[in-house]
Amino acid sequence: MELTLWTYEGPPHVGAMRIASSMEGVHYVLHAPQGDTYADLLFTMIERRNRRPPVTYTTFQARDLGGDTAELVKRTIKAAVDRFQPEALLVGESCTAELIQDQPGSLAHGMDLGGVPVVSLELPAYSKKENWGAAESFYQLVRGLLKEQMPAPGFVKPSPQRWRQEGRRPRVNLLGPSLLGFRCRDDVLEISKLLASHGIEVSVVAPLGARPADLMRLPEADANVCLYAEVAGTVCSWLERSFGMATVKTVPIGIGATGDFLKEISELLGVEIGATNEAESRLPWYSRSVDSTYLTGKRVFIFADATHALAAARIASQELGFEVVGLGTYSREQAREVRAAAKELGLEALISDDYLAVEKAMAEAAPELVLGTQMERHSAKRLGIPCAVISSPLHVQDVPARYSPQMGWEGANVIFDSWVHPLMMGLEEHLIGMFRHDFEFVDGHRSHLGDGAPATVPVAAPAAAPSADPWHGGAAAQVATLQSGHTATATLVAEPLAEPVVAVAAEPIQAVDTAVAGPPVWTPDGEAELHKIPFFVRGKVRRNTEAFAAERGLARIDAETLYDAKAHFSR
Amino acid sequence: MVAPPISADLALPEVLKESGQREVFCGLTSIVWLHRRMPDAFFLVVGSRTCAHLIQSAAGVMIFAEPRFGTAILGERDLAGLADANDELDRLVRELLERRPEIRTLFLVGSCPSEVIKLDLQRAAERLSAQLAGRVRVLNYSGSGIETTFTQGEDHALMAMLPLMPSSDEDQLLIVGTLADAVEDRFRLLFERMGVPRVRSLPPRRSTELPPVGAGTRLLLAQPFLSGTARALVHRGAKLIESPYPFGVEGSRLWMEAAAAAFGLAPAAVAAVLDPLEVRGRRALEPHRRALEGRRLFLLPDSQMEIPLARFLARECGMDLVEVGTPYLDRQLMAAEMALLPAGTRLSEGQDVEKQLERVRAERPDLVVCGLGLANPLEAEGIATKWSIELVFSPIHGCDQAGELAELFARPLHRRQLLSFV
C-alpha cells in the first residue's frame, strides 16, 4: 500500500486508451465499473479532442456482481462491434474487473465477431502504470496484427540498405507518438520534414493517426525510428527480434541530438546526407549571442519522463551553458539511462513517482529554473522558481494551438524560447543589477504612469535585487514587495524556497519569534547580511547557518556567524 | 406561495428506464467539494491508481497546497493477504497523521477494488479510532463506482458522520448538503430574520462540530441527492420538510417558505423577508431569461441535480425540456420537483449513453447539460453544452444566485452568438 496525493501516471488501461484513441479504426472494450469513464475527459478536455475516445465500458455496478458479469462483457463487446465496426478490437479490463476475473479477452476470442481481429490486453493494474500499459498495448496490437507475416526462425535479416536494389527511396516508420504525449503531433511533422529534406520517406507513423492496416505495413520499412521509448520501446525491440528490423534510437531533441540522429539514420540506411547544418536552427547562434551570457551557469533542475529528461539534460548542459543541479524521472522502465546521464553530470538521478520527494529534491537543489511536468510546475510555483513544462503529464495549456515541436531544428528553437523566457530577459538583469541601488527599483518595477516613488528607502531592500524575472510574476516580484518594511518579512521570502513541507517551513519563523531557549536567534545585522544573499540560495544559507550555529551552541547569529558558516561550508 | 401537499400516490410522469454504458463519475468525485467544506478533515481513498487518477482529473487543476485527500493505493501484496493490508493501512494512516497534525477527522473512503476484495474499512476505522482516541476520529464510507455515482458520495459521507451526531430534541432547522460558505451565511441570516429559532448545517464547517438531531429537528435538504442521509435523519427523529430545492427564485422561495411553515411562522413576516428578494431575483434573471426562452434543453444524467435544474430552466427561464436524465430517481425526494415540471416532460433514469446520444442528435437541442467527457465532442457536432460539474462547484443556491445560475446556461449560447470567423 502506498500513499499517493498526485500521480504522474494513470493506471495501465489509460495507457491502452492512449493507443486506441491515437489510432483510427481501433475500438477498445473495457470491462470497468461506472466512474472509470472519467478517463474520456483526458482526451476530450486536455487534448481538446472533438470526438469521444473509441472506448466502450461495461460500467458494471454492485448489483451486476451477483449476476453474470461475463454475460455483460459479451453483450458489450457485441454491441460495440455492431455499432462501431472496428478494423481491430482491443479487449481488456481495469483494476476492479481484474479482481473479478471474467477474462474478457478469452470471452471475446470465443465469440463470432465477423472476423474482426481481437487483441486481448492483460495489464496488471496493481503493479504497472500508464506508460507501461501504452507500450504493452501497442506491442500486443502490432504483434496480433503481424503474427501471420512473421518470418520463420533463422530468417535472413533484411538489409536496411535494400532500398538501393529495390530502386526506391529509403523509408522508415516513426513509432511512439501518441495522444497525451508531449508535443507528439508537431514532432511527427517536424521529423517527417527533416527526413524528407534528406530524401528519406516516412512509411508509417504509429500509433498516432495509424489504422490497423498501416500497422500491417510496418515490416515494409527499412528501419524503425523509436521516437518515444516509453511507448514504442517494446514494439521496436520485438520488430528487431522477429522481423530483423533495425531501430534508430537517438531521440532528435536538441541540436547535438538532431545531428546524431541524422548521422545514425544515414549510416544505417546508407544515405548520403552530407554535413548536418546546425544553422537550420537559431538555437546555436542565440545561445552564443551576448544576450545569452547571463544564462551561464544558471542552476537547472530537471524531472520528466525519461525521453525528455535525457534530452533536457544534454541541451541544458551543452547547448545553453546551464548547470544541471538535479536530474530525475518517474519512468522506472528507463531509469538506467537516466542514472547514467546523471552520473556523467556528477549527480545522482532521482527515480521516483512521489511528487513530494521531487519537490523536496527541487528545494534542496535551489535551482533558478525548473524543467519538469505539470507536477513540477506546481511545485516550482510554490517555491517561487520559474518553470518550463517539458514532458507529460500534461495540462490543456501544453497542447498549444501553434506549431511547437520539441524535435528537430525547429524544436530546438521552440525549446530555446520556452526555457529562456521564464528566466529574466537577457541584459535586463544586468541593468537591474547595475541600477538596483536606485530607489526606483526598491519595490520592483514601478509603473511609468507615475504612481510616485517611495518617500523613503527601506534599509533592507536595495541589496537583494531579484534574479528571476519579475515580468513573469515569479518570486522576484514577491521578494521585492515583501522586502519593504521590517525584517521579519524576509523570513517569509526565504521560506518557500527553504521547505516544501509545511511543518518544517514553520520552524525558522518560530526560531525568530520564540527567542528564549533552543535554536539560535538572528540578530538584526545577521538578518540584514542574509538579505544581501540572492533569494534563490538564501533558504539554503539560512539553514546551513542555523545548523552551524546550533552545532556550536551559539545563541545568536550575527553577520560574523554567517560568514563563519559560509567559510565552513565552502571547504 | 406554499408548495402543494405531496401525496405518495401523486400521478407521476412515465420514466424511461435505461441500462447500458453510463458516462458518470463515481462517488469519489464528491471529495473534491467535501474536503473544502471541512478544512480539518482528510479523505483517504483506499483503492487503486485509477481512483487517484480520477480525483486528480476530475478536480481539473492540481491545487497549490498539499491536498487534504489522497489515495492509499493497493498493491499486489495487499491483494495477496488482507491481514497485511490492514497493517499497511494502519502504518500509512499513522504516517499521514504525523505529517498533518491539524487533521481532526479522517475518512477512509472505500472504492471499487476495496469493496470487491471485501477490505473491511468499518473495522479498520473502529480500530484506528481506538488507537487515535481523543486526537482524530476515523470514519468510513464507500464512494465506489459500483455503489455510488458522483454526488451520492456526499450522501454516503454524511451518513458516516451521522452516528457521531448527539441526540437532542431541541427545536432547530437543520440544513443538509454542502453549500458554499457565503450562500450558507446568507440563508442563515434570512431564516434568522424570519424568526427560525436555530439554524444548523450538515456537513458542518468544522468536522468535529456536528449538529445534534432529534424530535425537534426539521430537516431541510439543500441538495437533491441526499436520500440515504435524509432517511437516516428521519430515523433519528427529524422531520423532513418536503419542498422543491433552492434553485432559482421560485425554488428558493418555496424552500424557505416550507421551512418557515414547519416552524409555524407567520406568513406575513416570512413574506416581508422574501418579497424583496423575489423582486430582485426576478430582475437579475430577466436578461438571461430573454437569452434562454424558447431554447430547447437536453440534460444528460450526471449530478442528480438535473430535475430541479430542469424545473428552474423551464419555469423561470422559459426553456423547452427535450429530455431530463437522472442517474437515479428518488421519487419521494423528487416529488415536489416533479409536480412542478411541465406536463409531458420526458424523464429518463439510468443511462445507455450511445442510445441517449442518438436521441440528442435526432432532437438537435439548443443546449445539452453533460459531463466533461462528452462536452467537446458534442460541441464539435454543433451542439452547445454546459458542463454539469460546474454546477457542484459554483454557488448556485438561493434567490440571490438565480441570475448567476441562469447565466451559467446562457453563457454557451451567448458565446456562440459572439463568435464569427467570416
Image (cartoon, rainbow, N blue to C red):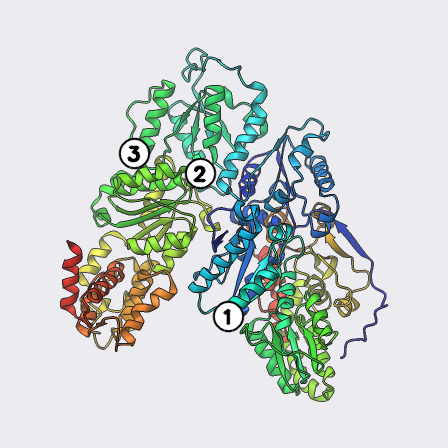
Between tags 3 and 1, which lies in front?
Answer: 1
Tell me the amino acid under the disc marked 2. Asp
Tell me the amino acid under the disc marked 1. Arg
- Which of the numbered marks, if any, corresponds to residue A265? none
Within 10 Å of disc 1 (Cα), the crowding (few <14, some 14-19, many 20+) is many
Name the quadrant containing residue B388.
bottom right
Q: Is residue A395 left or right of residue A434?
A: right
Image location of residue A200, percent across then percent down:
41, 23
Between tags 3 and 2, which lies in front?
Answer: 3
Do marks 3 and 2 share a chain?
Answer: yes
Do marks 3 and 1 share a chain?
Answer: no
Q: Secondary structure at mark 2?
A: helix
Q: CA distance from mark 3 to mark 2?
A: 20 Å
Asked if one can make out residue A181 in the rendered structure from this viewpoint, the answer is yes
Q: Are marks 3 and 1 in contact (CB under 8 Å)?
A: no
Within 10 Å of disc 2 (Cα), the crowding (few <14, some 14-19, many 20+) is some
Q: In front: B306, or A34?
A: A34
Q: CA distance from mark 1 to mark 2?
A: 49 Å
Name the quadrant containing residue B125.
bottom right
Q: CA distance from mark 3 to mark 1?
A: 55 Å
Chain under numbered label 2: A
Question: Reading the chain from its start, which is encountered first: label 3 or label 2?
Answer: 2
Q: Is residue A465 left or right of residue A271?
A: left
